[in-house]
Amino acid sequence: MNIGVLLYSSVLLMIPIGFAAIGATINEKSGIVNIGIEGMMLMGAFTSVLGAYYSNGNLLIGIICGILGGLILGLIHAVITVEFGGPQPVSSLGITLFATGATSFLLESIFGQKGSSPKVNTPKTSEFLEGIPLVGEYLADISIFIYIFIVVVIAAHYIINKTPIGLRLMSVGQDPKTAESVGINVWRIRYIAMMVSGGLAGLGGSFLTIGDLDRFQENMIAGRGYIALAAMILGKWSVKGTVMASLLFGFFEALKIQAQLSDSINIPIDLLSLLPYVITLIVLGLFIGGATGPKSLNKPFLKQKYQ
């Protein structure tokens, strides 16, 4: 087993989970439950391919379309839960069901085929970095999504922990009534948090299509959205902890693939495919007891609009 390949694969496989997990951390810090991350990733994956397909493989347009696909579903979830106080788990579950049906319908309606979209040729490397002296050729071999992920992690950590916006976000998640009494717009904070969450989930889906594969496949998220939620809980709603937990799941996914490719390990493929999910259950069983989310999580707050 090649350790270098295993570690790089772990990072790549962590990327979609990490994007979605950071997004989930942000929305839950505002007090909104979002188990629709799976559906937002799926929609982001589809709209990303759609954008790249109609722009002749433009990577930037594909990424922007992926973000918008998830962001729009995040906005819908915000309207239902923040605007009307709808049940957050039910709304977010509906988001996933809607995304599953909508992407299958649109796949056949737009591309005229079932199962997967046509191939889209997007750049797989960061080719614009090749001009940098000495290290350019090495930097160009690294997926551009890794650079984007590093920027997102640093920005999310800094904004949440070092800025007034982060303090407002956490105060809304802990006690929206008190937050509103000191002049914080709870409604606005929760809307923004949900749209950012949806956009990051869409970005995670975008990686799976134009960053890894070169097409969209039905139900291709395959539970990564739920693993992202597990990573958020395991990371105890902190950006650093969430990234480390995502990397853990990426490592076991990479280990599964390496084991499948190795002739020396005689384990049925179906059993190996269960490995990341079994690890998720074990880890949650061991650590969820010590993890507590924001106090106002899953509690509607309509005072500002209706009282």
Image (cartoon, rainbow, N blue to C red):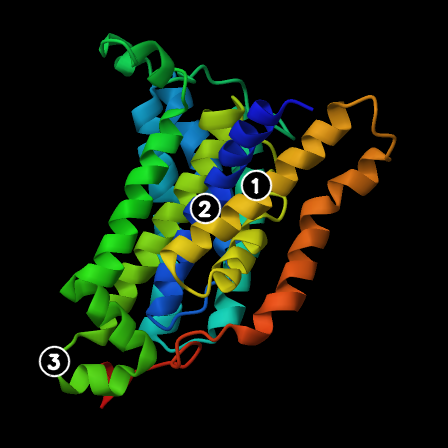
Residue type of the residue flagged with mark 3: Gly
Question: Mark on residue 18?
Answer: 2
| Label 3 CA crowd tier, 10 Å (few <14, some 14–19, many 20+) | few
Mark 3 vs mark 2: in front: 2
Residue at 51% across, 40% down: 14
Residue at 42% across, 76% down: 297
Which comes before the other along the chain, label 1 or label 3?
Answer: 3
Residue at 81% across, 34% down: 269
Quarter of the picture holding the C terminus:
bottom left
Instruction: Tell me where residue 125 sits by quadrant.
Output: top left
Residue type of the residue flagged with mark 2: Gly
Mark pair 1, 3: CA separation: 41 Å
**Residue 261 location, x and y as percent?**
74, 23
**Residue 169 location, x and y as percent?**
26, 68
| Most distant residue in the bottom direction | 307
**Residue 238 location, x and y as percent?**
39, 61
Could you tell me which secondary element the residue under label 2 belongs to?
A: helix
Mark 1 vs mark 3: in front: 1
User: Where is mark 1, residue-wise?
Assistant: 250
User: Where is mark 3, residue-wise?
Assistant: 183
Q: Is residue 227 above or below residue 291?
A: above
Could you tell me which secondary element the residue under label 1 belongs to?
A: helix
| Label 2 CA crowd tier, 10 Å (few <14, some 14–19, many 20+) | many
Q: Which of 158 and 109 is in front in this view?
A: 158
**Residue 54 location, x and y as percent?**
38, 21
Q: Nearer the viewer, residue 142 or 304?
A: 142
Instruction: Verify CB contact (< 8 Å) between mark 2 and mark 1.
Output: yes
Residue type of the residue flagged with mark 1: Gly
Which comes before the other along the chain, label 3 or label 2?
Answer: 2
Question: Mark on residue 110?
Answer: none
Residue at 82% across, 42% down: 271
Instruction: Verify CB contact (< 8 Å) between mark 3 and mark 2.
Output: no
